[in-house]
Image: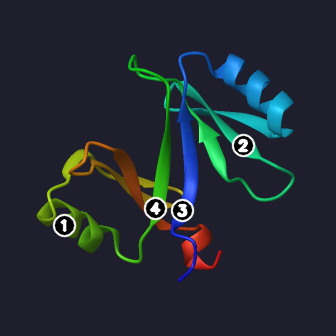
Amino acid sequence: MTNPFAYMELHPSSPDKAKSFYGDLMGWSFSDAEMGGATYTVVTNGAAPFAGIAPSSGGPAHWLPYLWVEDLDVAAKKAESLGAKILQPRVDIPVGSFVVLQDPAGATVALYQGEGAGSGA
């Protein structure tokens, strides 16, 4: 089985502080883009993008892992049948689609279909 983790996204209260910390700690590089009136930062380590930074929407800072799935709609329905709660219905973006859910234990995760580790891209 390939690595199911396709992407990670950080949601801090201060993206600039996060970029400074992780840039110094890990040597990561950052590229900002405007998306829907907000700044989204793509994170690389000299290779393909592996993470992003988006400002927190008021809650505590957190990392959001994206799990690669072959069929997003099927996986989301299965997650719901197993007790997950859909927090963000399907969102289509240029590189794929995702759903954010809360698992039965209370952890938040996104299911992702598109380019990434599991897709062979």
- Whichever of labels 2 and 1 marks the residue nearer the N terminus, that label is 2
Q: Residue furthest bottom?
A: 1
Residue type of the residue flagged with mark 3: Phe
- Whichever of labels 1 and 3 marks the residue nearer the N terminus, that label is 3
The 10 Å Cα crowd at callout 1, few under 14, some 14 to 19, many 20 or more, is: few
- Whichever of labels 4 and 2 marks the residue nearer the N terminus, that label is 2
Would residue 103 be found to the left or right of residue 69 on screen?
Answer: left
- Compute the Cα span from label 3 to label 2: 15 Å
Q: Which mark is residue 43?
A: 2
- Residue at x-position 16% and y-position 60%: 80
- Residue at x-position 49% and y-position 50%: 65
Q: Which mark is residue 67?
A: 4
- Compute the Cα span from label 4 to label 3: 5 Å
Residue type of the residue flagged with mark 1: Lys
Split into 4 quadrants, where in the image is the C terminus? bottom right
Q: Are marks 3 and 2 in contact (CB under 8 Å)?
A: no
Instruction: Give the labeled residue for mark 3.
Output: 5
